[in-house]
């Protein structure tokens, strides 16, 4: 192995959190940082064109394309679990919805004993990252941050039909999903500007890339964190088959995401001793919570075909529209190639006594050829109905002691005990609500045959069976290195790994509970706060 290069900080993973951390920690021009990313640079043109989302969801060079094991509660189907791979991480392949979540999410984290993580503490960090092109009220949104956020100028017209349909059922239209209470229906704010996707890499990393105190390594996969006498002192990595070592004078920061942060910890001997032993890994520090507490938003599709060509879709009749929009996009960056497909939605409470919504409806104006697909030949639309606060908990395990073998991602969906508020029963309430919305007169002109659930799927038993056969994730894993004070917590409220010095985890894995909605904006806020904690501790 070659001689180790030395930096103040080594950051593992250049995803949503890693890019923000690299930028913030090098801002003083003195602190040295090595940002290490397993995937490639973000040069693929379809990363940057929002409609390219359809392709990036299945593009193996920029997507880990993980598969969970067959799940007995999902008719033994394996679960597709995409994750971004390369600069920007999952922010380079995600659906671009900007959603902070609900005030009660963060207040709930604080109530668990995590001081400084309530909504009022986190709001300044949410504001810090963003330049909101539509708001500058100075209380909720600013125009000072790096990441551009806005409402799409030309969402697909069916999105307005969807919001109107919800309103016709006395559901409220919400002026701003990101004000702390997101119950209601509206068009989403998105991380898109001037027809281009804004990612953690384009907003935070690229403008800082030529800082002399920042080194960015791509196609470099960390195989383990080096621990000496209870302190993280560096990392070992694999660069094109060559082993290298990077030393960290101050700290190693793990930002490899909710699947791979626990993987790297376990490969480094930090985790449940029984799990480490299975793979012949010596225990550096017993921490049974590593990889446990996996939470994800399971979702079911409520999908209709459409005899109209209003939805996005490929058909002979739609060819002129597609050609015209492509021409507009390449000449002016306008038109639907600059749209993200998942452009509106709503949050509902299936029980009015809840403190926050428990179902998110994401409206998708495309025909989905098969579950998991985003767009197929033909026209249609659907609601992806997502369960927001699952009671089931999954786990990440190792498949081997080799970092190149994907971790086992065992979601254990619907494994909570049966009861009227079980995950399955809440999701079924959500499906019924979604069906009601899509059956309102607002959709009469557009509605074709029901695809999922089929028309004859009406009873709760039939719906349960449908959920097991057709549900999938919406790609929001969290919680696998949870922050907290109990025995299963992996990091404390300064995001320091319990029992090891010089090591933090800063990414979506630290959420004790997953937020009410999409997880990119919450992860950005975690990274902003994490950067401040690192800087404060360095000052002593
Ligand atoms: C398809 C998809 C759609 C989504 N849609 C939305 C949406 O519309 N809105 C929203 O808010 N959220 C969305 N999300 C979720 C959101 O993007 C994530 O929650 C967020 O990006 C997580 O950030 P992170 O920093 O925790 O991890 P990531 O951004 O995933 O970053 C982890 C990085 O670490 C790297 N890495 C892993 N292991 C190693 C290793 N051993 N060595 C070096 N590098 C390593 C990875 O390659 C990756 O680049 C979506 C996610 C996906 C995948």
Image (cartoon, rainbow, N blue to C red):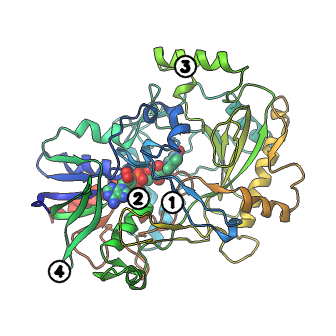
- Gap between marks 3 and 2 measured at Cα: 34 Å
Give the residue pinned by disc 1: 477
Q: Residues within 10 Å of mark 2 (few under 14, many from 20)?
A: many
Q: Is residue 203 left or right of residue 153?
A: left
Which residue sits at x=67%, y=41%?
363
Whether the residue carrying mark 1 lies under 8 Å from ligand 1 is answered with yes
Return the residue at label 3. Answer: 326
User: Can see residue 189?
Assistant: yes
Q: Which residue is labeled 4 in the image?
A: 229
Q: CA distance from mark 1 to mark 2?
A: 9 Å
Q: CA distance from mark 4 to mark 3?
A: 59 Å
Q: Earlier in the sequence, mark 4 or mark 2?
A: 4
Judged from the image, the secondary structure of the residue bearing numbered disc 2 is: helix
Q: Say left or right for 104 vs 118.
A: right
Residue pictured at 76% horizontal, 72% vertical: 420
Earlier-in-chain disc, 3 versus 2? 2
Q: Nearer the viewer, mark 3 or mark 2?
A: 3
Outermost front residue: 241
Q: Which is more N-terminal, label 2 or label 1?
A: 2
């Amino acid at each position: 192995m070659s001689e180790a290069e030395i930096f103040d900080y080594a950051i593992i993973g250049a995803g949503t959190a890693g890019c923000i951390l690299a930028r913030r920690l090098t801002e003083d021009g003195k602190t040295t940082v090595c940002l290490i990313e397993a995937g490639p640079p973000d040069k693929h043109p379809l990363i940057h064109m929002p409609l390219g989302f359809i392709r990036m969801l299945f593009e193996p060079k920029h997507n880990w394309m993980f598969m969970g094991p067959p799940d007995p509660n999902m008719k033994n189907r394996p679960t597709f679990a995409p994750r971004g791979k390369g600069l920007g991480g999952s922010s380079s392949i995600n659906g671009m919805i900007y959603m902070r979540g609900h005030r009660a999410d963060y207040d709930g984290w604080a109530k668990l004993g995590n001081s400084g993580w309530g909504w009022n503490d986190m709001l300044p960090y949410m504001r810090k990252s963003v330049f909101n092109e539509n708001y500058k009220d100075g209380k909720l949104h600013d125009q000072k941050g790096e990441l551009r956020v806005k409402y799409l100028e030309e969402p697909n017209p069916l999105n307005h039909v969807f919001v109107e349909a919800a309103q016709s059922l006395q559901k409220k239209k919400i002026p701003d999903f990101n004000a702390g209470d997101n119950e209601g229906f509206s068009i989403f704010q998105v991380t898109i500007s001037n027809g281009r996707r804004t990612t953690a890499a384009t907003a935070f990393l690229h403008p800082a890339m030529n800082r002399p105190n920042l080194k960015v390594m791509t196609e470099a996969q960390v195989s383990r964190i080096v621990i000496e006498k209870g302190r993280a002192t560096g990392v070992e990595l694999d660069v094109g088959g060559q082993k290298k070592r990077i030393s960290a004078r101050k700290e190693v920061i793990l930002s490899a995401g909710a699947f791979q942060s626990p993987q790297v910890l376990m490969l480094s001997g930090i985790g449940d001793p029984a799990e480490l032993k299975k793979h012949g890994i010596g225990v550096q520090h017993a921490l049974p919570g590593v990889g446990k507490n996996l939470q994800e938003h399971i979702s079911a599709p409520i999908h209709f075909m459409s005899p109209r060509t209003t939805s996005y879709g490929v058909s002979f009749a739609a060819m002129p529209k597609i050609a015209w929009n492509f021409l507009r996009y390449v000449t002016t960056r306008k038109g639907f190639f600059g749209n993200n497909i998942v452009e509106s939605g709503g949050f509902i409470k299936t029980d009015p006594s809840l403190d926050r919504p428990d179902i998110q409806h994401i409206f998708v104006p495309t025909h989905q050829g098969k579950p998991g697909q985003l767009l197929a030949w033909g026209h249609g639309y659907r609601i992806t109905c997502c369960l927001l606060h699952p009671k089931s908990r999954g786990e990440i395990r190792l498949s081997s002691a080799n970092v190149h073998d994907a971790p086992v991602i065992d979601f254990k969906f619907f494994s909570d005990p049966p009861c009227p508020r079980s995950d399955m029963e809440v999701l079924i309430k959500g499906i019924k609500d979604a069906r009601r919305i899509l059956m309102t007169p607002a959709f009469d002109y557009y509605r074709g045959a029901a695809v999922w659930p089929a028309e004859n799927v009406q009873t709760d038993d039939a719906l349960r069976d449908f959920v097991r056969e057709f549900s999938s994730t919406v790609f929001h894993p969290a919680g696998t290195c949870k922050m907290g004070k109990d025995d299963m917590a992996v990091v404390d409220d300064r995001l320091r790994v319990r029992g090891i010095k010089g090591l933090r985890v800063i990414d979506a894995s630290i959420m004790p509970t997953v937020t009410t909605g999409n997880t990119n904006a919450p992860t950005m806020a975690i990274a902003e706060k994490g950067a401040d904690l690192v800087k404060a501790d360095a000052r002593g």
